[in-house]
Amino acid sequence: MSEHEKNILVIGGGISGLTTACEAAEAGYNVVLVEKDPFLGGRVTRLHQYFPKLCPPACGLEINFKRIRFSDRITYYTMAEIEDISGGPGNYNVTVKARPRFVNDKCTACGACAEACPVEVPNDFNAGLSMRKAAYLPYEQAFPMQYVIDEGACKKGDCTACKDACKYDAIDLDMKPDTLAIEASAIVLAAGWKPYDASKIDNLGFGTSKNIITNVMMERIASLSGPTQGKITRPSDGKEAKKVAFVQCAGSRDENHLAFCSAVCCLASLKQATYVREQYKDSEVTMYYIDIRTPGTSYERFLNKIKEDEKVKLIKGKVARVHEDPATGDVIVEAEDIYGGSKIREPFDLCVLATGMEPMISGVKLPSDVKINENGFAVMGKDQKGIYAVGCAKDPVDVAKSVQSATSAALKAIQTVGRLS
Amino acid sequence: MEEKREKKIGVYICKGCGIDEAVEVDKFEEVATKEMKAPVYKTHNALCSPGGIDLIKSDIEGEGVNTIVVTACSPRIKHKEFTFPGCVVERANIREFVAWTQEPKTEDTQALAEDYVRLGVSRAKSADLPEPFLLDETEMSVLVVGGGISGMSSALGAADAGYNVALVEKSEALGGWAKKMYKQLPQSYPFESIEEPTINATIDKVNSHDKIKVFTSSEVEKIAGVPGQYDVSIKTNGGSEQFKSGAVIMAAGWRPYDVSKLDHLGAGNPNVITNMQMEEMAAKGKITRPSDGKEAKRVAFIQCAGSRDVNHLPYCSSYCCLTSLKQAAYVREKNPDAMAFILYKDMRTPGQYELFYKSIQHDPGVMLTKGDVTGVSEAPGGSVYVSLKDTLLGKEIKIEADLVVLATGMVPNSRIDVEELAEWKAKFDEKLKASGGQPDPNAPLEPHKVPNILKLDYKQGPELPVLEEAYGFTDSNYICFQYESRRTGIYTAGSIRQPMHMMGSIEDGMGASLKAIQIVEATKNGYSVHPRAWDQTYPEVNLQKCTSCKRCTEECPFSAIEEDEKGTPFHKMSRCRRCGTCLGSCPERVINFKDFSINMISTLFKDMDIPEEGMRIVALACENDAYPALDAAAFNRIRINSAFRFISVRCLGNLNLAWVADALSKGIDGMILLGCKFGENYQCHFVRGSELANERLGKVQETLGRLMLESERVKLLQLSIQDYDKLPGLLNEFADEIEEMEPNPFKEF
């Protein structure tokens, strides 16, 4: 068997794709990992902490990045997307297009380019809550530790400030897109998810007030590397957010939006409640839910622990409307208390919409035999061969389940390649 | 054996990224060549650039340099560039630790950078290239214990990947609980209707697979040996059999919670049955009430029967909501006139199983009511009343049912019997009350006690260790590493690991299978597995000097060290994960790695420049969390006191008290240990590294007392990789504390 035939192609470098790549490589197989962002790690890099341990994602990522660094079996490409997949199990031919980074491997991450860059744009890593330069490092513990130039924001021909500042000949503003041909025996789809567009949910007021935010924005606000260096404040005026509402199933379990349960939002809100309670002793948190879904051992334990805090109120109730009081900047949540039977109208400093997951696999150019269902997830048949979906490409799952799913996808991939020894 | 080749050291200094602006690079030459006696010394404006790499490469070829000290940036970057096959490479981090965190061009900054040159050369002198540890023969096969859906999935997973499998099942037939199911949950989109079971097809596939040997009516008698070379004995059909295996998967499953404990929910009433009994009834035919065989037209399902209940199972069993929805479909399918009532606390149908919930909910014959069941009593005519409070209507209601189904939860077979458990818990609470405490409903329900499944012939006990807060499930402590095991080569799958439904079990079985394959492949090639994947070093022991104190055998997190007949410890190497906890535990300093040893670190203290004037503090940093946190602090250009010399260790569990004595007796003023959070929810990936370091520090007073030094000179900090903002402040605070003390009097010697 020639070397390239042993290849497993993993599409997506988030926690699912990273795990699949490392697990398969450590079983002795060659892996090509393709990621569309300029860094690996995906969505979890934006999280402040994981539930229920409240530990930092960077810790596990550090190990996974080390697994990649020390492995000569993993080749990864960032800023790369699938152009075409042909062939079948055992002999796929894949065309990958890599966007120009404009920064080559000589980059030392010294930061001189960003310092010199005159262009500022909203920082997408921080959900637009802060600004960054057009020459930037996605975040301070990014892997690879290599700067990137935002093609859309850079003034291109008009400005060479970054190039002039770089002492290492690492900036190449003429860099062209690259096309790569990859041969693989098996393909793992780990395209992940993006937050559901909350502005589509009319009654929850996203976009009408800066103080109505999504759970993903809340992670950035609570994070040390985020727009407020971890200080939980409301975006409109920087006031400390001490009274915070969480609106569950914002889009999820709703046939007009996402018909499925996104599986992580209950735990994410409970976790974010701890961020608030940890930071301000005199804070109050209210969570409006349909069902609290904390399945299993450690998640239920986490829920019970939070229930002990009398400053956290869990109300079963459907939220009818969220809007800003223009006089105070407060956010008014109107809901029905299903237990109490009454109508609630309560002002908060900040309202967090627990928005669900929108799968991104439909954005990948896949062969016609891979079906995507109405919810946007890949449909995996019982006799699926050659191409396997994993993590949130297949079903909405949390990090733990993504890792589990990734490990089993690595097995399916190596089965397709065949035993090596 | 090949004769050890002569080392030729080359020191390469990078002047880029602010290093040249922060220090007088020219002065390093004397330190490197005269003081540390490195024969080759070169500088470059950007060492990681192609020109810099070529400079090193040409010295390897032309000068015979084979030991390279890259004095530049953090070892966490430019790894590929600074990898030179066949050469020892040490990285002295003067970019992050000097140029980015110190005031430029001061005497202290210069002294600090020069020390890093010394430490780099010193470490390079002590390090050798790894030679992998290889077994004479590696058994490329897998033992699976448990023939339910998870175990079968594991077995097929490994067999289809080309590995031989032995599958041991204690009952007469394969299939486990899944075989008792009348129908199964939908396994794929649109997740709307229940399906005919596929378990028989799976059983047939296992039984007919030429790579799987099935042992039914069999139990494990003993598992001895190491990954790649397990000696397995099983009891099978009255006889016994022995064979070798490369890895083990424990998929020993679960049992339903003991329903007799649920008399408050009507247990004992013939018309109150469990969800598993419901499966059996549905499989046989009509749904009737057991008391008189009358067809059951009103069936009530009580959710969380035992689960989410501090008096029973404090956790959520995860499968019961879906199972009751499925069984409600049985009720409706068997008799379109019959009604099903599901009485729940929260309906938990995460992911796309929400679609199944919706499809059942849309059936007008299924009523879902949120509430807490307050009682179950006999009703006239053989029916049963179920009383409910806190319902959505806000009042107490009573439902009359022909049949009540208790959605009982899962108890992992790795947990001791419930009877024993209840007794233990009662005693525990009594004792607690007697001492004035309040019983904690979330307290672990059991001591570390598990039944006989694997019967490991291991120093640290016959079964897999169970986390205190895992209620007997053999779960991993790490969110991002679900198959992490404290017994290398042994992985657990399915509902013995976490409560899960069938589709989850199939996936989990395959995940465990991949880990089993991984360990045999890694063992065969002499690599460590997670978290030090690809590491080819291993602990080498100078047994002549071992005093058999056995501390290493007790402290090894993976039970990788056994004792021979004379009581002398020895490593079962392929169980080892290369953390070096043993190295820290050894009072005789006889355990060493090729690239990391007690003497290597002690020599650093000797080679460091310790002037009479000027404070010196050594910081030992865990390479996975503290070290990256220091890098991140440097990236943010946060100032750190120039007294600190950072030394990376594999884990704080490496801390040997000899280091404290050696450092402080050389005149070093203080020592700080930077490690991970320990205790519940520990973050150390070697389980107890930082905690053990802390315990060892308990004895440091004695050492320091002997030296007539204050015990406050040594301190341990628990931190995470994200604490990079706080870390410099904490370090500077420690430096202030040391500054307030007299300089270490040993400086004068």
Image (tube, coloured by chain):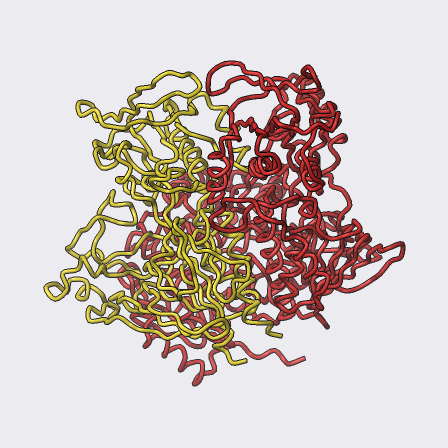
> Quadrant of the image for the C terminus of chain A?
bottom right
Q: Nearer the viewer, residue B498 or B395?
A: B395
The residue under the point 41% across, 79% down is: B57
Q: Is residue A312 visible?
A: no
Residue A145: name its quadrant: bottom left
- Residue B365 is situated, as x and y percent measured from the top left of the image, at 53, 30
Q: Return the x and y of residue B197 as percentages of the image width and height.
A: 63, 50
Is residue B349 in view from this perspective?
yes
Residue B734 point in image, percent of width and height: 44, 40
Q: Which chain does red denote in the image?
A: B
Q: Which chain is yellow?
A: A
- A142 is higher (above) or lower (below) than A210: below
Which is more toward the observer, B138 or B187? B187
Where residue B462 appears, as percent x and y from the top left, is 76, 48
Q: Is residue A290 above or below residue A419?
A: above
The residue that appears at 27% across and 61% down in the rendered structure is A148
